[in-house]
Image (cartoon, helix red, strand yellow):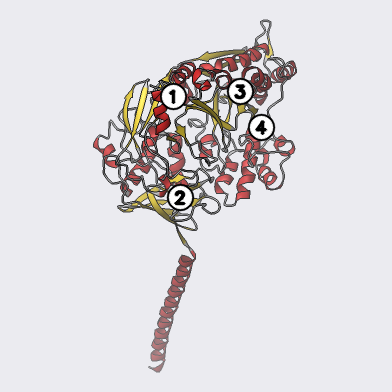
């Protein structure tokens, strides 16, 4: 009996010990979880910077680069070239009118004097953990769409999902993997969740920059208001300007919304100063120049060297009615040039691409056709701290070596590919043409009795230059002539704007003039420009360039949490892209050419990363009246 009682007592003690152990274990687990939660600091801020601290403190009055006392009134008018048949800029269908996307606002807006820094617009603040696994935006309750209805968290979630379901495929596929879910926590709080095991950099700024649509407007007629269809009916946005009227292919007029909700918030002080913004459409730049001289529109941002050098000698310039200004551009020059479509069989061999590059004579073009006004471009980040220079070393060399056999060994041991030099005295530099023809011979494209190059299958080496810009005729044709002198069946085909847009989107071309816009803080957008998955359909990658030597570098750039790691990987990417010879680099300016009738004024401390004509400048009413009273302007 006694032994039985001892046994039962022992079992009770064991059970109590088990309960105690479980309780202690649970308590320890709870304490551990609590400690972990405590360590996960939640950051709440009025803005977001991808690296470093924000320049502007909470409650700042306005950006440094605005005139907070800028007068309001008058009209900004400028020119656009080509045609338009839609006010939906989020589809491949149709050709959207100028400023079509500007009627939509986002949760955050960028600062023009800080790289990769953003401040609250529709959102008054945001909060996120140090891990950046998610972000919550606290929206401004006073925000309204142009029809007076409130902008809510539901609208933000709807907009995010609509872009994934009906937006551009290259955007949707990239974003869906990284931002799988958005949730409206209440009427004015929206939360975005970020996928595990992906880099966090730029995710917050990406969702903060998403355009916000009116859910009610789209759902009122979901079939006819699809985001992937061309339409002339604009959607409802919350931005300061509304579409007022338009005349297809001739004119678009926007007017400032008198009931705009955000006039007085700090990020808008000194901005949006015009009563109306009018865009006049012209078939070509020559007609547009005549329109400017006649005062049909009153501000012109020039991009043609011949016009800048020779066309500004009309009476209004002489009497001071029109001002010519060269203003500093502190942003990264666009990586532009003659882009080769790598899907075309004739461009598969890099020796062919190098030979095509050698056919272009920048020095002669610049001196003879462009009045010596441009500089030669080589890098995708020309003239910045992100440009690859010299031999790779340090961390840049390490990340290149990590690519293994995927990278061209020459990238590790040689200086980055730079634009070749040519003699400016004559159009065809014979030294370069001889080198180019040798490369073509080595690539198996041999010259026949008729002077045309063919491969061993008898296929002709042909290249078509596609363009819709008459001003490029005098630039492209000498290049074409040089390629013909090398035995290439080259021709120049200038088509209308609509046909060019369609063929450009479908990548139905051999070569075009185009570019890859870059930034000082590149991030997830690189997947749309050079990523492997989007290469076959991305409208942001005209060459179709991608590969195992590019994708890991993009991954590293997106994952970078320190500036030096970012810089090293961008320089490595610059080096790899240049080695691929996907385009013939042309030129860059490094400043803005602007001509305007003398009634415009602008802040003296214009920011480095935007000219700000549309949102920082203003009209001097007295000067405008003087121009009109004198008969200079109607």
Q: 10 Å neighbourhood of mark 2: few (<14), some, or many (≥20)?
A: some
Secondary element at tag 4:
helix
Mark 2 = which residue?
Answer: 195
Left of 435 or right of it: where is 276?
Answer: left
Secondary element at tag 2:
loop
Q: Residue at point 48% right, 15% down?
A: 495
Secondary element at tag 1:
strand
In space, the residues marked 1 and 3 are separated at their CA atoms by 36 Å
Image quadrant in which the N terminus is located: bottom left
Of marks 2 and 4, the one in the foreground: 4
Of marks 1 and 3, the one in the foreground: 1
Of 377 and 614, the residue lying toward us: 614
In space, the residues marked 1 and 2 are separated at their CA atoms by 43 Å
Mark 4 = which residue?
Answer: 579
Q: 10 Å neighbourhood of mark 3: few (<14), some, or many (≥20)?
A: some
Mark 1 = which residue?
Answer: 79
Above-or-below relation of 310 to 541? above
Q: Residue at point 39% right, 87% down?
A: 8
């Amino acid at each position: 009996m006694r032994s039985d009682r001892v046994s039962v007592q022992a079992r009770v003690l064991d059970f109590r010990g088990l309960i105690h152990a479980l309780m202690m274990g649970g308590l320890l687990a709870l304490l551990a979880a609590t400690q972990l939660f405590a360590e996960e600091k939640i950051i709440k801020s009025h803005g977001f910077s991808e690296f470093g601290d924000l320049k502007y403190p909470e409650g700042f009055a306005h950006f440094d680069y605005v005139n907070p006392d800028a007068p309001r009134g008058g009209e900004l008018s400028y020119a656009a070239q080509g045609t338009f048949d839609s006010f939906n800029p989020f589809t491949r269908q149709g050709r959207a009118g100028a400023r079509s996307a500007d009627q939509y606002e986002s949760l955050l807006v960028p600062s023009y004097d800080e790289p990769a820094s953003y401040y609250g617009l529709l959102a008054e603040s945001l909060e996120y953990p140090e891990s950046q696994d998610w972000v919550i935006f606290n929206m401004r309750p006073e925000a309204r769409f142009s029809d007076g209805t409130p902008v809510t968290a539901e609208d933000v979630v709807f907009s995010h999902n609509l872009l994934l379901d009906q937006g551009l495929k290259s955007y949707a596929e990239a974003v869906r993997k990284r931002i799988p879910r958005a949730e409206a926590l209440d009427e004015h709080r929206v939360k975005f969740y970020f996928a595990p095991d992906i880099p966090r950099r730029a995710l917050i700024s990406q969702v903060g920059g998403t355009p916000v649509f009116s859910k009610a407007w789209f759902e009122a007629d979901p079939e006819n208001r699809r985001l992937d269809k061309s339409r002339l009916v604009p959607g409802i946005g919350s931005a300061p300007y509304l579409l007022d009227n338009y005349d297809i292919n001739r004119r678009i007029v926007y007017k400032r919304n008198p009931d705009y909700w955000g006039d007085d918030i700090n990020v808008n002080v000194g901005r949006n100063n015009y009563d109306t913004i009018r865009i006049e459409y012209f078939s070509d730049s020559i007609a547009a120049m005549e329109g400017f001289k006649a005062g049909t529109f009153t501000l012109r941002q020039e991009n043609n060297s011949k016009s800048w050098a020779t066309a500004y000698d009309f009476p209004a310039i002489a009497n001071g009615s029109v001002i010519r200004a060269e203003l500093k551009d502190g942003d990264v020059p666009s990586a532009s040039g003659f882009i080769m479509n790598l899907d075309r069989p004739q461009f598969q061999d890099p020796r062919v691409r190098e030979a095509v590059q050698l056919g272009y004579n920048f020095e002669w073009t610049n001196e003879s056709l462009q009045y010596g006004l441009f500089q030669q471009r080589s890098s995708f980040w020309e003239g910045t701290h992100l440009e690859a220079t010299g031999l790779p070393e340090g961390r840049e060399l390490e990340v290149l070596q990590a690519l293994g056999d995927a990278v061209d060994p020459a990238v590790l041991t040689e200086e980055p590919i730079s634009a070749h030099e040519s003699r400016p005295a004559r159009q065809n530099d014979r030294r370069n043409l001889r080198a180019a023809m040798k490369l073509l011979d080595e690539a198996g494209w041999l010259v026949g009795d008729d002077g045309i190059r063919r491969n061993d299958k008898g296929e002709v080496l042909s290249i078509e230059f596609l363009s819709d810009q008459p001003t490029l005729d005098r630039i492209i044709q000498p290049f074409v002539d040089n390629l013909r002198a090398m035995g290439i069946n080259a021709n120049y085909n200038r088509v209308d704007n609509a046909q060019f847009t369609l063929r450009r989107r479908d990548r139905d071309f051999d070569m075009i003039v185009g570019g890859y816009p870059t930034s000082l803080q590149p991030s997830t957008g690189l997947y749309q420009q050079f990523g492997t998955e989007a290469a076959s359909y991305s409208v942001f990658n005209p060459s179709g360039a991608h590969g195992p030597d590019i994708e890991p570098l993009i991954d590293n750039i997106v994952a970078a949490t320190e500036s030096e790691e970012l810089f090293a990987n961008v320089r490595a990417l610059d080096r790899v892209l240049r080695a691929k010879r996907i385009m013939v680099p042309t030129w860059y300016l490094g400043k803005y050419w602007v001509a305007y009738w003398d009634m415009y004024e602008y802040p003296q401390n214009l920011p480095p990363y935007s000219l700000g004509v549309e949102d920082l400048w203003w009209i001097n009413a007295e000067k405008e009246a003087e121009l009109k009273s004198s008969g200079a302007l109607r």
